[in-house]
Structures are given as C-alpha cells and as structure tokens.
Amino acid sequence: MSTLERIENLKDTECIVDMLLKEVRANLCQACGKCVFGYEGITQLELTLSDITEKKGRSGDLDLIKDLCQVMKTQSLCETGEEIAEAVLTAIRTHSADFEEHIGKKACKAGVCKKFMTYHILADQCNGCGDCMDECEEDAIQGKARFVHIIVQDECTQCGACLKVCDEDAIVRAGLVKPKCPRKPVPCRR
C-alpha cells in the first residue's frame, strides 16, 4: 500500500504524524545523497515530525514543512523525493486538525504518541498497597499504606512500569481525555 493510500485509509487508532514519521524514516532518499533536496529534505522532515510527536512541536512547524515539501516536489532529482513531499502535503491538507492538536494542545487523540500519554491512579480501584511506588524508578508516585497514591506528572517518564505491577488495575494510561483523580494522597475507600 502506498503512502497516499495509507493516508486516505487512516484508522482512528492510527496517528497521522507518527505514520508519516515512520514513512519518512524508511524513505530511500535518506541514504541516497544524490540530491540536496531529497537527502536534506527528508532529514529536515524527520527532525520536525519527530519534534511534533515528542511534544516539542512549535507553531511555525507546519508552515516550515509545507515550504520544504513544495521545494522538494520541484527540486528533487528522483520520484521518491517528490512522492514523499506530496504525501506529507496531502496529510497536512486532509488531517490538519491532528497536526494542530499535536502542536497546540500537546495531545494525540489516537493515543499512539507515547510522550502525550499520561498515567493515573484511579481512587476507587487503589488499595494503597505501594507496589507501584516500589516499582517507580523516578519516585514519581506519592502515597503511603492504605492511601490512594498519586502520580506526579512532571516527574513521570511514562515508562509504564507502574501499570504492569498493579494487580488492582488501578493505574490507567490516558490520552486526550484524563480521568478525575485526587491531587494528593487520600485514604482508600476499600
């Protein structure tokens, strides 16, 4: 399936930015080096798309990508560079809301981009066992025995170790919609 076909048939569980980043990384222009606009264009696209998927996207990134792709379409010496530029422009045109969501709201509605995901402890499920605190290498989880624990989002690295160790299924991974959780440790109801 071509890149354009994948863009047109994108599922709700797929992220357009992540998909484009993978396509750009797999592009043959990356290793070719015969033309500046193919090789450097692909390199710049990869860096910019990578920033967007890692919560580092800036407001001017889409304009930069559009300008770069327009030049790539006319100056690349092979069809491969032209095709990837056209695919990126089509993706921005048809899925602009997804790009703006990544850059402006710092969110990935498909839940694919790991940096946009957060982990939360549900108060009605937590029994205050402390297993998640013991597992967290970053000490991002606060609490004490028989208290609902909380995850300090600024310290969490989204490794998912706490999710794996919780036998109560009290820890959830959330994307755009975040669950309501206590802001500080509170006594368990269970």
Image: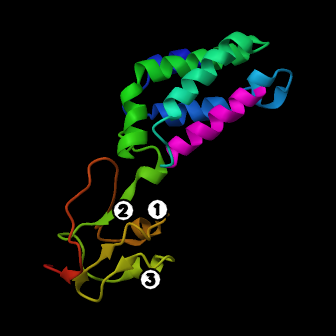
Provide the major secondary structure of the magenta segment: helix
**Residue 165 to residue 74: above or below:** below
Q: N-terminal of the two: label 3 or label 2?
A: 2
Give coordinates of residue 144: x percent, y percent.
Answer: 30, 88
Q: Amino acid at mark 2?
A: Tyr
Which labelled disc corresponds to residue 134? 3
Give coordinates of residue 101: x percent, y percent.
Answer: 37, 38
Question: Which quadrant of the rendered structure holds the C terminus?
Answer: bottom left
Q: Amino acid at mark 3?
A: Asp
Q: Can see residue 1?
A: no
Q: Which residue is mark 1?
A: 158
Give coordinates of residue 152: x percent, y percent.
Answer: 36, 72
Please give the name of the residue rendered at 43% of the width and 24% of the height, measured from the top-left corner.
Answer: 10
Residue 81 position by quadrant? top right
181 left or right, relative to 31: left
Give coordinates of residue 103: x percent, y percent.
Answer: 43, 40
Please give the name of the residue rendered at 68% of the width and 18% of the height, measured from the top-left corner.
Answer: 72
Q: Which residue is mark 2?
A: 119
147 left or right, relative to 25: left
Secondary structure of the residue carrying tag 3 is helix
Q: Amino acid at mark 1?
A: Gln
Mark 1 surroundings within 10 Å by alpha-carbon count, few (fewer than 14), some (14 through 19), many (20 or more): some
- Residue segment shown in magenta: 39-54
**For the residues marked 2 and 1, what is the alpha-carbon distance in whole angstroms?**
7 Å
1 left or right, relative to 125: right
Secondary structure of the residue carrying tag 1 is loop
